Amino acid sequence: DAGVIQSPRHEVTEMGQEVTLRCKPISGHDYLFWYRQTMMRGLELLIYFNNNVPIDDSGMPEDRFSAKMPNASFSTLKIQPSEPRDSAVYFCASSYSGGGGGLGEQFFGPGTRLTVL
Amino acid sequence: GENVEQHPSTLSVQEGDSAVIKCTYSDSASNYFPWYKQELGKRPQLIIDIRSNVGEKKDQRIAVTLNKTAKHFSLHITETQPEDSAVYFCAANNNNDMRFGAGTRLTVKP
């Protein structure tokens, strides 16, 4: 298995532009998580899905952020419009609950380094 | 919500010595406590985890202890090596809502 795949690996954009980050979880995993990492705030959980359904989006900073998971193998995190304070590394992670809703190890993708100028 | 505090923020040890990182959590419903290692520019990777029905777990040079009553858990690395140098994160997980500590930058000096 290739592990969790994220694209792009690096994104540089200008303030006000729309940014879309993509994630392909490990096949068979039923949970998908989006995290943001900055020096100031550390690792923050933004949102997570179970079986493609958003379960908790309380970590999403504001309405400019949205996430979707149209199927079990693909998720997007969109920022519109982007602002310089959105600059961070965004990680996607997936896990398998074992079917019983239990907690499994979260496997992280390589991350997308976003810079908003 | 859950609040995880991690100490120390930086730790420097001599190769061969032990390193201990401590975390506390606030939500007594948290029941899964993983530890992640993150090397510079790379993704966090799980190194060990413990569930709330276990008090201690060991994997070679790494061990984790959990005190549910006091709501704290610790990572112990023995016989440290230069390649152990990284940032280590603890986390507390309640129903898939995972909260991370701020991280500890461990430096192992040869």
Image (cartoon, rainbow, N blue to C red):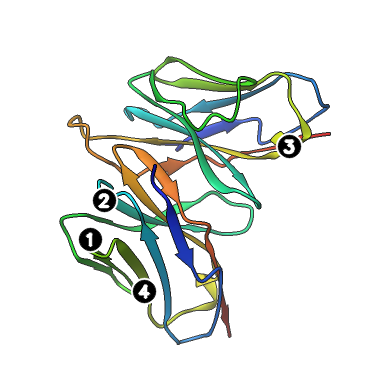
Q: Which residue is mark 2?
A: B28
Question: Please, is residue B30 above or below residue B62 in the view?
Answer: above
Q: CA distance from mark 3 to mark 4?
A: 36 Å
Tags 4 and 2 on a common chain: yes
Question: How far across and how far down the image is residue A7, in percent?
Answer: 61, 29
**Residue at point 35% right, 51% down?**
B92
Tag 3 near tag 4, CB within 8 Å: no
Q: Which residue is mark 3?
A: A85
Query: On the image, numbered disc 4 is attached to which residue?
Result: B76
Front of the two marks 3 and 4? 3
Instruction: Point out which mark residue B58 bears.
Output: none
Which amino acid, by three-letter code, is at mark 1? Answer: Lys
Q: Secondary structure at mark 3?
A: helix
Q: Are marks 1 and 2 on the same chain?
A: yes
Cα gap from disc 4 to disc 2, whole angstroms: 23 Å
Residue shown at 35% from the left, 68% from the top: B74
Coordinates of residue A65 in the picture (x, y in percent): 60, 23
Q: Chain of mark 4?
A: B
Q: Callout 1 environment at 10 Å: few (<14), some (14 to 19), or many (20+)?
A: some
Q: Disc 4 marks which amino acid?
A: His
Instruction: Work out whether mark 1 precedes mark 4 in sequence or the reverse, and give the earlier one.
Output: 1
- The residue tagged with tag 4: helix, strand or loop? strand
Quickly name the residue at label 1. B68
Same chain? Circles 3 and 1: no
